[in-house]
Image (cartoon, rainbow, N blue to C red):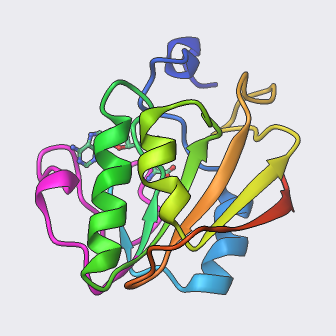
Amino acid sequence: MLNRGLFSSASSEWETPQKFFETLDVEFGFTLDVCARPENAKCPRYFSPEEDGLRQEWAPEVCWMNPPYGREIGKWIQKAYEEAQKGATVVCLLPSRTDTAWWHEYVMRAAEVRFIRGRLRFGGAENGAPFPSCVVVFRPGYSGLPVVKSMAAR
Ligand SMILES: C[S@@+](CC[C@H](N)C(=O)[O-])C[C@H]1O[C@@H](n2cnc3c(N)ncnc32)[C@H](O)[C@@H]1O
C-alpha cells in the first residue's frame, strides 16, 4: 500500500498506470523515460532527479514524460516542445489544466491532445485522480494547432 502523502496534489510521484503506459508503448515504442526514479521508471533508459532530465538532451529519442506535477511542470512542457523541435517525439501524460500559461504556450502547438474520458488511477491508488488528465504528443518539427481526440482511461 502506497503512502497517502504520495497522492497529494503537490506530489511529484503520480506513477503512470502500467497498462495505460503499455498501450501507448505499443503505439510509440518508447526509448527514454525523461523523468523517473529507479522504482518507477517505465523504460530501461531514464533520467533520474540526480541526472536532471531538464538538463539533458532528449532528441532524437522517442520519449515518455509524466512530469513532476509541482510548480516546475511548465519547465517540463517547454522542454518537451523544444526537444521535439530538435527531433524528439515526446508523449506526455499531463493534468488537463487548460487555463495555464504552459497549456496555451506549448500544448497548443503540440501535434495531438488526447483528452482522457474518466479519471486515471495512478500507481496503486484505490480511487481515481482528483483531476482530469490528457496525453499530449509533440512530434519532431511540428508546431501547429493540435488534433484533438478522446481516449479511454483504461
Ligand atoms: C509523476 S512521476 C512519473 C514517474 C514515471 N516516469 C511514470 O511515468 O510513472 C515523476 C518523476 O520524476 C522524477 N523527477 C523529479 N525531478 C526530476 C528531474 N529533475 N529529472 C528527472 N526526474 C525527475 C520524480 O522523482 C518522479 O519519480
Q: Residue at coordinates 15% horizontally, 49% vertically from top-left?
A: 52
- Which residue occupies the foreground of this view, 150 or 66? 150
- Which residue occupies the foreground of this view, 34 or 5? 34
Quadrant of the frame with the N terminus? top right
Q: Main secondary structure of the magenta part?
A: loop
From this viewpoint, is residue 138 visible? yes
Instruction: Reply above or below: 32 against 108.
Output: below
Q: Quadrant for ligand 1?
A: top left
Q: Residue at coordinates 54% horizontally, 57% vertically from top-left?
A: 108
Quadrant of the frame with the C terminus? bottom right
Position of residue 19 measured from the top left corner of the image (x, y, whole percent): 73, 62
Q: Residue at coordinates 45% horizontally, 18% vertically from top-left?
A: 10
Left or right, residue 27 beside residue 137: right
Instruction: Reply above or below: 18 against 8.
Output: below
Mark count: 0
Position of residue 70 measured from the top left corner of the image (x, y, whole percent): 39, 25
Question: Does the segment drawn in magenta span residue 40?
Answer: yes
The part of the chain drawn in magenta is: 38-62
Question: Does the segment drawn in magenta span residue 59?
Answer: yes
